[in-house]
């Protein structure tokens, strides 16, 4: 590892005042900042843990936005997954996704890129979190660590068009 938890906490705490958008999850909040949210055993529990982590993280610095992923592992190859944005007063959650994991590498990058894309486009937070979560969920189904999908393909899934029918 790059550094101990104590070193990570010290260094990252010093950087937080300069962060506008913080990307995290409940596990990282616990590991780095010792933010405890309980041990969820249901999907709703995972969502609640993410909300609690977001509120606790928001107390550390004046972020414009917190972006969190929420994940559960019903089996070794299957994930339940969602995204959550928090602006300090309101939560914006995505629809949940369940998918077979082909490759986890790049999933967080795809979520981050999706959030940044939505912010740069001036989208509403609700649209941004749907797009980012769809981008990340789809990336998990692609081998390799790059998301090879177009914006249009991601927007289709973000809009709920997940029938499984072949599109030509």
Image (tube, rainbow, N blue to C red):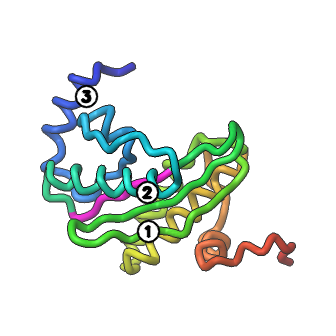
Relative to 137, is 125 above or below?
below
Q: Is residue 153 above or below residue 111?
A: below
- Residue drawn at x 62%, y 61% as measured from the top left: 97
Tag 3 or tag 2, which sits nearer the N-term? 3
Q: Residues within 10 Å of mark 2 (few under 14, many from 20)?
A: many
Could you tell me which residue is drawn at 36 percent across and 48 percent down? 24
The picture places residue 82, in percent across and down from the top left corner, at: 52, 59
The numbered mark, 1 or 2, whose residue comes first in the sequence reads: 2
Q: Which residue is mark 3?
A: 8
- Image marks 3 and 1: residues in contact by CB distance under 8 Å: no
User: If you read the primary sequence from the N terminus, does the residue marked by circle 3 or circle 1 appear first?
Assistant: 3
Position of 97 relative to 12 (above/below): below
Q: Main secondary structure of the magenta part?
A: strand
SS type, badge 1: strand
- Quarter occupied by residue 98: bottom right
Mark whose residue sits in front, 1 or 2: 2
Label 2: which secondary element: helix
Labels 1 & 2 near each other (Cβ < 8 A): yes
Dot label at residue 93 = 1
Is 106 in front, or is 25? 25
Identify the residue shown where x is 50% and y is 48%: 108
State how far apart marks 2 and 3 are (Cα). 25 Å
Magenta-drawn stretch contains 65: yes
Which residue position holds label 2? Answer: 47
CB atoms at circles 2 and 3 under 8 Å apart?
no
The crowd level at tag 3 (other Cα within 10 Å; few <14, some 14-19, many 20+) is some
Please state, as top left, top right, bottom left or bottom right, where the N terminus lies in the image.
top left
Q: Residues within 10 Å of mark 1 (few under 14, many from 20)?
A: many
Span highlighted in magenta in the image: 64-70
Badge nearest the viewer, 3 or 1: 1
């Amino acid at each position: 590892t790059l550094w101990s938890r104590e070193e990570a906490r010290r260094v990252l705490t010093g950087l937080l005042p300069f962060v506008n958008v913080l990307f995290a999850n409940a596990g990282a909040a616990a590991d780095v900042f010792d933010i405890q949210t309980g041990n969820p055993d249901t999907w709703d529990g995972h969502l609640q843990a993410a909300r609690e982590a977001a509120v606790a993280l928001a107390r550390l610095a004046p972020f414009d936005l917190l972006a969190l992923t929420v994940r559960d592992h019903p089996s070794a190859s299957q994930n339940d997954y969602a995204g959550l944005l928090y602006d300090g007063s309101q939560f914006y959650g995505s629809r949940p996704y369940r998918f077979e994991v082909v490759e986890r590498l790049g999933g967080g990058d795809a979520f981050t890129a999706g959030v940044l894309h939505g912010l740069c486009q001036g989208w509403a937070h609700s649209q941004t979190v749907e797009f980012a979560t769809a981008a990340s969920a789809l990336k998990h189904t692609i081998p390799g660590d790059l998301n090879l999908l177009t914006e249009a393909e991601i927007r289709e899934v973000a809009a709920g068009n997940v029938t499984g029918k072949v599109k030509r």
